[in-house]
Amino acid sequence: MTEYSMLYPENTSTRMAISLDGMWKFAIDWNEEGDKECWRNGIPGNDTIPVPASFQDFYTDKETREFTGDVWYEDDVVIPSAMEGSRTFLRFSAATHRAVVYINGEKAGEHEGGFLPFLVDISEKARYGEHNRIVVKVNNELTETNIPCGRTIRLENGRKMSKPYFDFYNYSGLQRSVHLLSIPRSSIADIDLTYSIDGSNADITYSVRTEGNGSIRIILEDAEGAVAAEAEGKSGVLHVADAHLWNVRDAYLYRLRILLSDGGRLLDCYEMEIGIRTVEISGTDILINGKSVYLKGFGKHEDSDIVGRGFSIGVMKRDFELMKWIGANSFRTSHYPYDEEIYREADREGFLIIDEVPAVGLFESLVNFLDAGTGKGASSFFAKETTPALLKAHLKAVDEMIARDKNHPSVIAWSLLNEPESKDEHSVPYFTEVFAEARKEDPQRRPCTFAMEVSSGPDTCRCHHLCDFIELNRYYGWYIKGGYEISDAREAFRREMDRWKEKNLNKPFIFTEYGADTVASEHKLPSVMWSQEYQEEVLDMLHGIFDSYDFVKGEQIWNFADFQTTEGLMRVNGNKKGVFTRQRQPKAAAYLLKRRWESLPSDYKG
Ligand code: GCB
């Protein structure tokens, strides 16, 4: 449970949510003097920058793009007099990776963890009906005590540099929306929902957490606005006759209205859209509303030209249109929880989400994603001095992610780590705590899992017993035996899969990564690695293997689109495993996937 309410910022009859998105003042703290020079009272210079956005890709000099340290944002906000008397908050949908928030020169709050929201209570410090100076210090340094993991080094010229242990650019800043919130003193803080379906009827069991006084009434309205069920009390059951279920690529949303009143006086009202559906693992099946589903889709990134990892509503729309066009039904929020708007859109479009916490880079290697497969590097990432602090940050992110996302019908599972060290005995207690936390926090007890890289194999991984289904990231035909050796890649892959089969885990397997880097300009007949032809050959080879094991219940290719990474020998201005280019145009493989996914039934192998 988080210390503050994670409810999405809605305007209702009792609440105000005012967007502070737009141009903010911006300054980079080149000389690490911002604290000493009291920038909290006002930042120097007159540069301005859009919020939300990553700061990196607007500027034309490399020093700015690669800047590691503190960047400062400032906004002048008139806080309406009408907000006085209620509780007033600043809500940051994310600040990457840590932030300190000041109002009128006074510290109001701080938060660590770059991909989840936090509230800062400014009720007492705000000047109502007047101008207020909001200053935010955002720090983007990577450490081994926070997720995602990495290091910060110092170059000989004194500049700091980020060394991510992961394969995406360390974009940062205020990358998601900021809101000014006004919430009544007695208010609705949270709600838990669980579903059970019985024939054509459904029961929604609910439990509301409130602050202050009042009693609860709860009303469920169907998509036409007709009342479908009602109940009273902080916890109870809504009986829905002839329930219209939320289904894969066939969404149906009800509106839930929660009213907090005191003797007939309305104190607070909160509204949200929900979908009635169940999620369950049974043997090797993933069941949605009791029916088997085969996952088709992507590992994605929030990544696009110019705004970097900044949320772009236009890019979001395009991505969903492309996912519909290609016949996908799901995606993983690799490697961090995405902007809340993306989950709301998935709720509306009926996409299934594997929601991933930002636990990536938990492997002793500077280039984790490349060295991992070779087994290079020490094998005790979880037996370091930093481990207790890392675990604390990890558990906090799990709590915040589940608190934020638990009521989205689209979210069907929690992915609790990406490609961690899992062969070492020290992984076991660490993973056990993370899994226990997720299971404790989620009222719907969704399946929990983690994505395994190739050295976490059938005979080496010590943690897969914790998973409700298995996520495999496999690059046979690329990192393993690429090019003309692809026939050996196939044999090696088959041997691995046969070993998994022999283990008879009786759990579904999902391929959460597979693919090949492909430069959109390259065509070659016969193929070579990096050409569009080769991407198709790899996919054909891998799909053939997926199809021959009944317990494989899904394929999410890496990656939806080309994306930015740190520069280096293995990356051509970013990772090119996209099925679409970074500008969201199809490579040849997109047509291959479209043919395949449109022809596979939704309950394939069910
Ligand atoms: C992986 C990582 C992902 C990388 C990908 C790659 O295993 O999970 O973050 O981008 O491989 O392309 O190497």
Image (cartoon, rainbow, N blue to C red):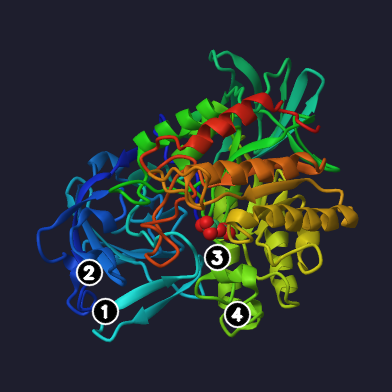
**Of callouts 3 and 2, the N-terminal one:** 2
From the image, tell me which residue sits under label 2: 63
Front position among marks 3 and 1: 3
**What's the distance in space between the residues labelled 3 and 1, CA to CA?**
26 Å
Q: Work out whether mark 3 precedes mark 4 in sequence or the reverse, and give the earlier one.
A: 3
- From mark 1 to mark 2, how far is it between C-alphas? 9 Å
- In primary-sequence order, the first of circles 4 and 2 is 2
Amino acid at the residue labelled 4: Gly
Could you say where residue 561 lies in the image, as x and y percent from the top left?
Answer: 45, 44
Which mark is nearer the camera, 4 or 1?
A: 4
Q: Nearer the viewer, residue 327 or 67?
A: 327
Which image quarter has ligand 1? Answer: bottom right
Q: Which mark is residue 377?
A: 4
Q: Amino acid at mark 2?
A: Glu
Along the horizontal axis of the image, is 154 left or right of 418? left
* Residue that numbered label 3 is attached to: 369
SS of the residue under disc 2:
helix
